[in-house]
Image (spheres, rainbow, N blue to C red):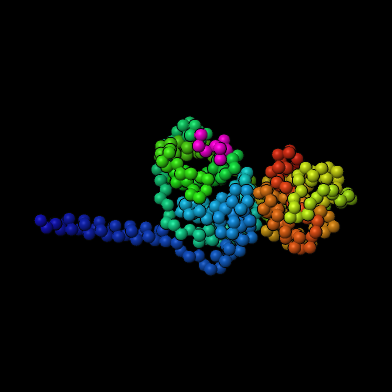
Amino acid sequence: MRPSDSERYHRRRGLLLAVLLATCGARAHAKTAPPPEQMEKGRELYAKMCAVCHGPAGEGYRADQAPRIAHPDFLAAVNDDYLHSAIAQGRPGTTMSAWSKQRGGPLSPAEVDALVALLRSWDHAPPAHLDEHRLSGDAARGKEIYAEECASCHGERGVDGRHVHIGSSPFLRGATNGFLRYAIGKGRAGTSMPAYADSLGADRIDDVVALLRTFQVPAGLAEQPPSRPPPLALGPVPLNPKGKPPVGYNTYPQTTSVDTVKGQLDAGARFALLDARAPSDYATEHIAGAVSVPFYDPAPYIQKLPKNAWLVCYCACPHAESGELARRLMEAGFTKVTVLDEGLGVWKQRHYPTRSGGKP
């Protein structure tokens, strides 16, 4: 039996619609190559500011569990807005700095875009299919599952573990439910994050996602950016200008313990404390008396630093950024340079004094 004119019309219409959808889908998944100058800028900035922790090619774990940002499953699941926000706003409570000028960092929006373009150049997989159906999980059930499966790596509330702070509000604001489902279900091959799709199933994964959403603080309660953009004024160096030289300091590449540095500070020794992190981190919290000298650009401060006094560099990762600053100072002719062993983290664990704001 021959199809009627009406049937032929609907078949042609359906075929045309399928072709159009396939074409649109291909265009949506196509990756437009960024301008060469943007890529070059991204490579320059990454090498200067990011590689020290994330590795030269985004392989991760170069310092303080910095994640593998070139992981194909990660790049396949995140959009550019997520990447831009993560770079610009950082991850409070971690060693991931806020790099945007708006938050007290050194980068303009165009420079953040250049870094995003570089990360996208590492993305060779097709976009992941993210299940964004309405969340129906139960947070109470999720709490039990999380305690058994997740807390040992991510901490009781997702912000006090040794791995990615999945309870961080900026992270959760940028991560869709589909992204979280995908990450939990698929895991991160080649890392310590296993796949839970088979062991938990979709419903129990939703329970965990529902719990994670209870960790999220509303955006209006987020910390405010510092009032002054970088570079920050150096401030007085050295501390205790009339004091005696410190005792027990070890020249870089060796480190000096926090207890030795604190003891010499209490004794009135003459030295300077240099915070090697981004100014946004310095403004959030720094060792009392320290001045801001970012590891990625010490040039504005070189002429103002004393070569006849010890310079103690520190960061929080715990030696990567401070070690880079110390290396650059040694190359500039400074000889009395050391790195604070274990950095700000151990200093705070000892309950030694810290301050917030742009002043030492």
In this rendered view, identify the residue nearer to me: 344 or 100: 344
Q: Quadrant of residue 356?
A: top right
Q: Residue at x 45, y 33 (%)?
A: 138
Q: Residue furthest left?
A: 1
Q: Relative to 39, is 266 on the left or the right?
A: right
Q: Position of residue 157 (x, y in %)?
A: 56, 37
Q: Relative to 146, is 104 on the left or the right?
A: right
204 versus 234 height, above or below: above
What is the magenta segment's predominant secondary structure?
helix
Q: Position of residue 276 (x, y in %)?
A: 71, 53
Q: Quadrant of residue 298?
A: bottom right
Report the magenta residues as a range: 148-156
Q: Is residue 81 visible?
A: no
Q: Residue at x 45, y 41 (%)?
A: 196
Q: Relative to 14, is 142 on the left or the right?
A: right
Q: Residue at x 41, y 39 (%)?
A: 201
